[in-house]
Image (spheres, grey):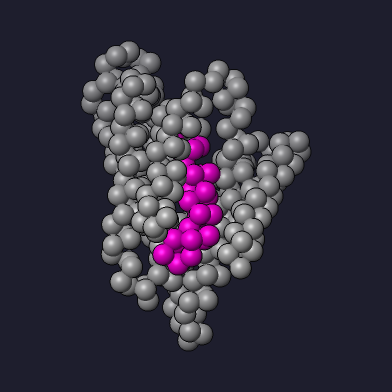
Amino acid sequence: MSLLILIIIFTAVGGVLSVMAAAVFLLLPDHLRNAVLPHGISFAIGALLAVAFWGLIPEAFEQVKPEQFQVLSGAILSGILGFFVLEKLLIWRHCHSGSCEAHGDEESHDHDHDHGHSHGSAKSAGALIILGDGIHNFVDGVLIAAAFLTDVQLGIVTSLAVAAHEIPQEVGDFAILLHSGYSKRKALFYNMLASLTTVLGGVLAYFGLEDLHDSLPYFLALAASSFIYIAVADLIPSLHKKTDMKTSLQQIGLIAMGVLLICSLHGIAHSMAG
């Protein structure tokens, strides 16, 4: 199977299928959905951090000379800071529970004016989220392609990590769009449209990066910084809403499961390749 076909398949897994999984998840009763979602977030944290520190960063450093280590480390740091700035400017991310402070006014407006919330500021907020998700998904596609161009096994585990964090994010997207006045059908359509940019990013990166082999370590560094930022800045804070011992132990256990799964998949893939 050609590398391009693999990139298309796995960017679709990380994008389109995560939207469909989130849509199915939203059909669950509210109490069940709210009970399950935090567990998925905990697992995603472990998966993202494992891919960043176990796969992407070591692979990036293996491809550069020792005198470039400092530059590559600076790229990781710059990536983390850059994602923070982009989050501020584009509202890339929002609370995975669907109740961000930035959207509180729209939600109140919904209750006060019924169907009138379909227009005005609430609708604009929904459009901004779709735009931000489209940009984010495009970058995810570039990062998955960069991983595949480095090593097929690394590409597979990277796409799985993307899917792991995309599902809870897409659940949050649906919640915000519904609060902004979109029907379930329109929310699904626009989320699906935004997810297709993952495939677009992967295909464009395949043709653009294949001839830029020297730049691949820095795209891997960007991927690692993205995963670290998502896990540390967006997902981990949501776990601190509950501090009882039982919940905390569950969170730690699920994070460990996410780490172990990715490390195991990475080890199995490399042993098969060997």
Residue 94, image x, y percentages: 43, 40
Q: Is residue 178 left or right of residue 264?
A: left
- Residue found 38% across the figure and 24% down from its top: 179
The tally of labels here is: 0
Of the pair 136 and 240, the residue shown nearer to us? 136
| Magenta residue span | 147-170
- Residue found 48% across the figure and 65% down from its top: 151
Outermost residue on the left side: it is 120
Residue 103, image x, y percentages: 38, 32
Is residue 158 rendered magenta in the image? yes
- Residue found 44% across the figure and 43% down from its top: 13
Residue 32, image x, y percentages: 60, 22
68, above or below 58, in the image: below
Q: Is residue 117 left or right of residue 162?
A: left
Q: Quadrant of residue 273?
A: bottom right
115, above or below 61, in the image: above
Main secondary-structure element of the magenta-colored stretch: helix
Q: Looking at the figure, which quarter contains the N terminus?
A: bottom left
Residue 81 shows up from this direction: no
Is residue 101 rendered magenta in the image? no
Outermost residue on the bottom side: it is 67
Of the pair 143 and 107, the residue shown nearer to us? 143
Of the pair 227 and 216, the residue shown nearer to us? 216
